[in-house]
Amino acid sequence: MREAIEKVLEAMREDYKQWSNWSSSYKPNPHSDKKIMNEMIENYCNGLKVEENRRYWKITGSNGGGSQVSVKGFIVKAGDKKFREGDMLKPAGWAAPARNFARGNVLDGTGVYNVRWTGIG
């Protein structure tokens, strides 16, 4: 399970890098902010954390500035009546996921396609 979750985190990191490079190309002088952009990428990539709770793995992450932390998503640890082990759920708040439907599954490989740097959704 940890390896599958790490693939999701890596997909989020790569998406942030692509978004940063894309957004910097629309600035008047994109090369002037290269140092700041690299710091923001490093802050984001190092800020992603996985916390094990009783029912879920909670993914949290900081913004590029490193000053704010938010929940990026939840992954089901063990199946229940509605979800299978490894199902990815969008956050409803800091402590709980939205339990309307799964956004993919990390164990069957569909999870990496449903994440962005902003989280599971």
Image: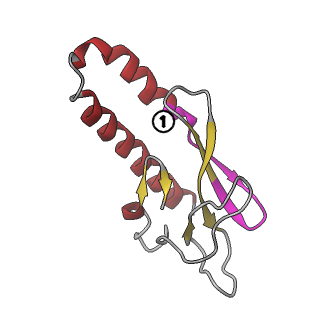
At mark 1, the secondary structure is helix
The residue located at (69%, 50%) in the rendering is 51
At label 1, the amino acid type is: Cys
The residue located at (68%, 56%) in the rendering is 93
* Above or below, comparing residue 86 to residue 15 in the picture: below
Report the side of 120 relative to 74 (left or right).
Answer: left
Image location (x, y in percent) of residue 84: 59, 80
* Above or below, comparing residue 81 to residue 101 in the picture: below
Q: Residues within 10 Å of mark 1 (few under 14, many from 20)?
A: many
The residue located at (61%, 27%) in the rendering is 67
Magenta stretch bounds: 44-58
Q: Quadrant of residue 114?
A: bottom left
* Above or below, comparing residue 10 to residue 113 in the picture: above
Magenta residue check for 45 = yes
Image location (x, y in percent) of residue 2: 57, 57
Residue farthest right in this picture: 54
Residue farthest bottom in this picture: 81
The residue located at (53%, 34%) in the rendering is 63
Q: Nearer the viewer, residue 72 or 108?
A: 72
Image location (x, y in percent) of residue 61: 58, 41
Magenta residue check for 81 = no
**Which corner quadrant holds the N terminus?**
bottom right
Image location (x, y in percent) of residue 42: 46, 27
Name the residue carrying label 1. 45
